[in-house]
Image (cartoon, rainbow, N blue to C red):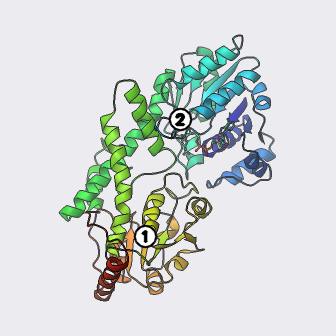
Amino acid sequence: MQVAIIGVGYVGLVSGACFADLGHTVRCVDRDEGRIASLRAGRMPIYEPHLDTLVARNVAAGRLGFGTDIAEAVRDAEVIFIAVGTPARRGDGHADLAHVYACAREIAGALQGYAVVVTKSTVPVGTGDRVEHILQTLRPQASFAVVSNPEFLREGAAIADFKAPDRIVIGTDDERARAVMRNLYRPLEAGTRILFTGRRSAELVKYAANAFLALKIGFINEMADLCEQADASIHDVAHGIGLDRRIGARFLQAGPGFGGSCFPKDIQALIKSAQDLGAPTRIVETVAAANEQRKRRMARRLIQACGGSVRGLTIGVLGLTFKPNTDDMRESPALTILTALLDEGADVRAYDPEGMEQARALMPEITCVPDPYAVAEGADALALITEWDAFRALDLPRLRRRMAGDVLVDYRNLIAPEAAAEAGFHHIGVGCRATPPAPRARLARARSARRGARIGTPLAASPA
Ligand code: NAD
């Protein structure tokens, strides 16, 4: 089949490459000329494991091409995907649909013959109606259907998720469009449940799924706080509840709060839509507020471990992206934590396997170094913020020897506390007991706290 994909970001590029790999002929278009030039030169504009090989293979086979001309891509396509960004609208948190509607207008101008126009972008309930209205108004004679086909792939595992999803949701009441979409996804049909729903339901499935996952994370984080106060272990509690099949073990890892390009903005958009429709989602509102507070509290955890002030201290940071195996920094907890540390007068030195370029653009004040051991050099404290596999096997004694202090705040519970203690760290995880600081380090921290109190603004104690 001939497929056009508008928007060559994480979703559009992965979807385009995967559809081509399934045998379809795919034209990916983006208004960002630099992005397209880079792809044409064989350079990936994003980091996603194995994406470069997949793209190269399908470009070479003549099934995948890139361009900037939407009209040209749309003209011959049987299926046209809108996969552009839907960020939070500045000021009110609603999803900003300007890019989606701009695509609809461009598509309207180029439609020839019957085509299925698919919103793959995450959009609020009712957006498909509006896209349909735009197309109908601009091209009353055109033959088309508007379908919702939300995407559930996870960055870092996007290709596997696309090719073997838990389900494919297709929202349409149009029989012809349903047949076209079934044909498109036929190569995946054997191993995947294809769920046909109404268009509005499909739009809501995506938001409801993200809100539910965020709720699980928010819940386990709250339990982690409780474990810290109750001298219990979040590992045991999460394991104990996760074995219940009604709950399930996934998304029960306590941490610094969720971030990323989807959860925070999708939850806000759901909250706004629900309010507009007169059916406010109180639970989701609470999860969103609690998560924002948590990210801010996470910086205090480190500041307190440093004696109440980080002014003039060097804080080494391991991991910047919102999760491993991506270069995506959008809404990463690292942004909130590092901004607070910088505001408190710390020098921040950081390493991330893929995210340093994006991080530097967002926080020019941080110093990026080429590896974890350079992060530790002379550092007063370390913060492990993203659970990259590469950090699992760090040589802890080597890290510790390079540091001036002994604090390791492990926001992902990646390092075994016993191993950290053995290497001489004062290890502070999430939802579990901290290992005690070495007596010498305790003295140094008390001195640093006194210095901080003299030259900086001491922080009020808070139960971080
Ligand atoms: P992205 O920001 O990585 O990419 C969007 C692309 O669209 C950019 O390259 C941009 O230049 C292009 N674009 C914007 N307006 C355009 C226009 N008018 N014409 C042509 N190109 C245009 O976004 P993303 O992360 O791929 O997300 C896309 C959508 O998919 C969003 O709605 C998002 O919520 C949803 N989604 C994302 C993920 C994810 O993990 N990133 C997962 C599922 C769903």
- Quarter where residue 227 is shown: bottom left
Badge 2 marks a residue whose secondary structure is: loop
Pick the front one: 19 or 351: 351
Sequence-wise, the earlier of marks 1 and 2 is 2
Q: Residue at x 44, y 80 (%)?
A: 396
Q: Is residue 78 left or right of residue 351?
A: right
Query: Seen from this angle, which residue lies furthest bottom?
Result: 440
Q: Residue at x 39, y 56 (%)?
A: 295
Residue assigned mark 1: 383
Report if the CB atoms under discs 1 and 2 are less than 8 Å apart. no
User: Exactly how many numbered labels are in the figure?
Assistant: 2
Q: Residue at x 69, y 14 (%)?
A: 143
Spot occupied by residue 105 in the image (x, y as percentages of width and height): 68, 25
Spot occupied by residue 16 in the image (x, y as percentages of width and height): 68, 40
- Quarter where residue 453 is shown: bottom left
Q: Quadrant of ligand 1?
A: top right
* Residue type, mark 1 in image: Ala
Q: Is residue 344 above or below residue 449?
A: above
Confirm or reject: label 2 Cβ below 8 Å from ligand 1. Answer: yes
Residue assigned mark 2: 122
Instruction: Give the position of the C terminus as an image quadrant.
Output: bottom left
Badge 1 marks a residue whose secondary structure is: strand
* Residue type, mark 2 in image: Thr
